[in-house]
Image (tube, rainbow, N blue to C red):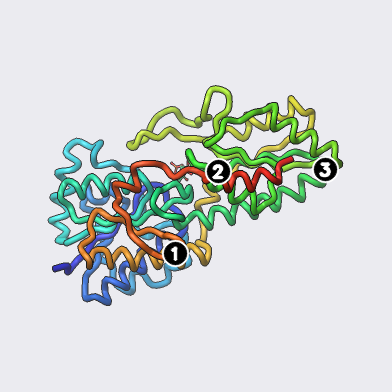
Amino acid sequence: MIKRIGVLTGGGDCPGLNPVIRAVVRKAISLGWEVVGIRNGWKGLLDNDSLELGVYAVSGILHKGGTILGTSRTNPYKEQGGVKLAKENFKKLKVDALIAIGGEDTLGVANKLYQDGLKVVGVPKTIDNDVSCTDYTFGFDTAVNIATEAIDRLHTTAESHHRIMVVEVMGRHAGWIAVHAGIAGGADIVLIPELEIDLEEICGLLKTRHSRGKDFSIVVVAEGAKFGKGVVVQEEAKDAFGHVRLGGIGHILGNEIEKKTGYETRVTVLGHIQRGGSPTAFDRVLGTRFGIKAVELIKEGKFGHMVSLRGNEIKSAPIAEAVGTLKTVDMRLYDIAKIFFG
Ligand code: F6P
């Protein structure tokens, strides 16, 4: 019988985490359960760093970005004695089950701990929208809206100065943010990690557009897009999950475009602005629905599963399936973006 559950947020933060935490607490309390929040992702489980979460603790957080629990990229499987410690602290916290809210890395750990005997369920989050088995993750819609607004703003200054504006967006090894914001913002070129960049082709498209009388352009490039030797990294060193820090493709590409076309070019890197601030209404609703469903999964004993969105239905899927492969851009969507190139 379930009496007390834990909840943690791991990996890069994103708008919508607080609505999930709030929903988890409110739903669990309605079932007569207690909730303990674990601070800073898996790090908090190793440090036994927690706080009790009642109705008061989660009041007034729905509209706030970030996570009241804090986050980290700690991987217990990379720490000496980490798994043993995680299991011991799970017992010390007297929790019967744990909700892990995170992207592929946090969910990967959740799945391993589940296989190692802990009762864990998952909630997928990331602005990158690259987790399999769910149509969308919360945080993505907010990031796309921020990027779209930025593109709108860049449009007016690009037009006044007859310039090419290159906009670098996040998304790691998937181009979801780039494609959605590109379509929504009316980008003239969208470059994604799923396809190799062809500089000749891009410059050809830009020249055709300019020769038609449109002497300004917007090029959206995903941070993970491959150019020349491959992905461009800010930092070669890998984190506990084996990721390098991406970024810098925008400037390299901007220089090349200017050299090849002769058109004055400027570069904007949106960076963490895409991850900060208030969640959109869509992300608040999705986060709330995910939080409620996560508690229901525990009630049903569906451990090792994560919540997911399929169409407009909240469903669940084995975490193992979701973390097996990255969900990359649907090329049918990219083909739609391409119709507006040049
Ligand atoms: O996964 C979310 C994300 O924002 C990626 O789009 C980006 O590459 C990465 O996290 C940045 O991570 P950090 O928080 O370490 O700067």
Q: The disc labelled 2 sits on which kind of residue?
A: Met
Pick the quarter of the image with the N terminus: bottom left
Q: Mark 3 sits on what residue?
A: 214
Indicate if the residue with disc 1 has its beta carbon within 8 Å of ligand 1: no
Side of 287 relative to 302 (left or right): right
- Of callouts 2 and 3, the N-terminal one: 3
The residues bearing labels 2 and 1 have C-alpha atoms spaced at a distance of: 25 Å
User: CB atoms at circles 3 and 1 under 8 Å apart?
Assistant: no
Cα distance in 3D space between marks 2 and 3: 27 Å
Give the labeled residue for mark 1: 286
Ligand 1 has an atom within 8 Å of the beta carbon of the residue at disc 3? no
Residue 100 percent location from the top left of the image: 30, 55
Across and down, in percent, residue 75 comes to 28, 41
Element class at badge 1: helix
- Give the spatial CA distance, label 3 vs label 1: 40 Å
Q: What residue sits right under mark 2 in the picture? A: 331
Amino acid at the residue labelled 3? Lys
Picture quadrant of residue 206:
top right
* SS class, disc 3: loop
Q: Is mark 2 within 8 Å of ligand 1?
A: no
Judged from the image, the secondary structure of the residue bearing numbered disc 2 is: helix
The residue drawn where x is 62% and y is 35% is 250
